[in-house]
Image (tube, rainbow, N blue to C red):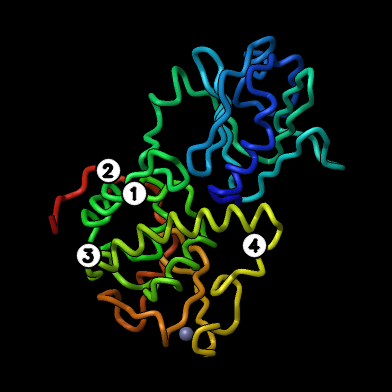
Amino acid sequence: MPEGPTIVILCEEVAKFRGKVVRNVEGNTRLIDPERMLRKKVLAIRSWGKHFLVQFSGFTLKVHFMLFGRYRVDERKENASPRLSLGFANGELNLYACSVKYLEGAPEDHYDWRSDVMAPEWDPALARRKLRAMPDMLACDALLDQSVFSGVGNIIKNEVLWRIRVSPLSTVGALSPKKLAEMVEEARVYSFQFLEWKKQHVLRKHYQAHQRSYCPRCGMKLRVAHLGRTHRRAFWCEHCQKKYGGLAETPARAYAPRKKKATKALKKPARRGE
Ligand SMILES: [Zn+2]
C-alpha cells in the first residue's frame, strides 16, 4: 500500500497536468461518472495522507490506492485495464485497482491538513492532544490512525517505533510526554526521509526493523506478528523496544481481527490525561 510520501511523489510526477484540460477519459470504474471531468480544467493536484486529490471547479476526484492500487504516467500497464484514465494534451495519467470517488465542494471542506504528516500545515501539538485522548490504544494502532497521522503506513510505523525504542504493544497512555513527543516528531522526520530514499530508489536498504530479521542495534532476532485492530505486520526488538503499559504477555486482544468502525469512539474522545 502506498504511504503518504509515495503519494507526494505521484503529485510531483503529475504536476504538469495542473492547469490543463481533461481531453479524454476512460476506465472501468462504476462508482463515478468519469465524463464529469471531460473538458474540465485541473485546478490543483495534491495529497492528504494516502489520498490523491485532483481538484476541479466545484468538485474533487479522490483516489485511494488501497492495498494493490498502482499508477502509470504517460504509459500503461500491460495486461491491465485502468480503473480510470485521464488524458491531457501533454500526457496521460492511468490509475489501476484503486478506489475513486468525487468529493463535492473544495478539498478543504473534507480534509484537515494539520493531521497530514507531510503537509506544511502539520500540527504536532494537535497530534499529541489527540494521542492523549486515546490512552488505551496500542502504539502500533496509534501510528496507523489516519485521523492522527495521516499518511503513515506500516513501514513508517515499524521504523518509527524502532527508532524511538517503543514496543508496538505499548499503550499510548503509558508513554511519557517525552516519548509521545518523540513519536509525533519522528513520524514526520521519518516520512520525509522515506520520501528522499524512495525518490533515490534506496528505501528498502534503509529499513532498520521493517522486513528485517535481526535488530541492527543489538543483534537480537526481531519479533514479527500481526498486531492491533488493524492487524498489520509489526517487526520489533523486544530487547531495545520497551513495552510501556500495554497488554499482558499473551496479547489475545491484540491479535483479534479488525473491527469495523473501531475508530468511531475516537472521534469524540474523552479528554483524559489533559
Ligand atoms: Zn534491538
Please give the residue where the numbered disc 2 appears in the rendered image: 267
Taking the image as shown, residue 36 lies to the left or right of residue 118, namely right
Q: Is mark 2 within 8 Å of ligand 1?
A: no
Please give the residue where the numbered disc 3 appears in the rendered image: 177
The residue type indicated by label 3 comes to Pro
Taking the image as shown, residue 140 lies to the left or right of residue 24, namely left
> Where does the image place residue 259, in percent across and percent down from the top left?
40, 55
Whether residue 34 appears in this view of the structure is yes
Q: Is mark 3 within 8 Å of ligand 1?
A: no
As displayed, is residue 13 above or below residue 106? below
Numbered label attached to residue 263: 1
Q: Residues within 10 Å of mark 1 (few under 14, many from 20)?
A: few
In terms of sequence position, does the residue under pointer 4 or pointer 1 come before the other?
4
| Residue located at (36% from left, 45% from top) | 147
Please give the residue where the numbered disc 4 appears in the rendered image: 203
The residue type indicated by label 2 comes to Lys
C-beta proximity under 8 Å, tags 4 and 2: no
Q: Indicate the quadrant containing the C terminus: top left, top right, bottom left or bottom right.
A: bottom left
Quadrant for residue 97, please give it: top right
Distance from the alpha carbon under mark 1 to that under mark 3: 23 Å
In terms of sequence position, does the residue under pointer 4 or pointer 2 come before the other?
4
C-beta proximity under 8 Å, tags 2 and 1: yes
| Residue located at (70% from left, 35% from top) | 95
C-beta proximity under 8 Å, tags 4 and 3: no
Q: Nearer the viewer, mark 3 or mark 2?
A: 3
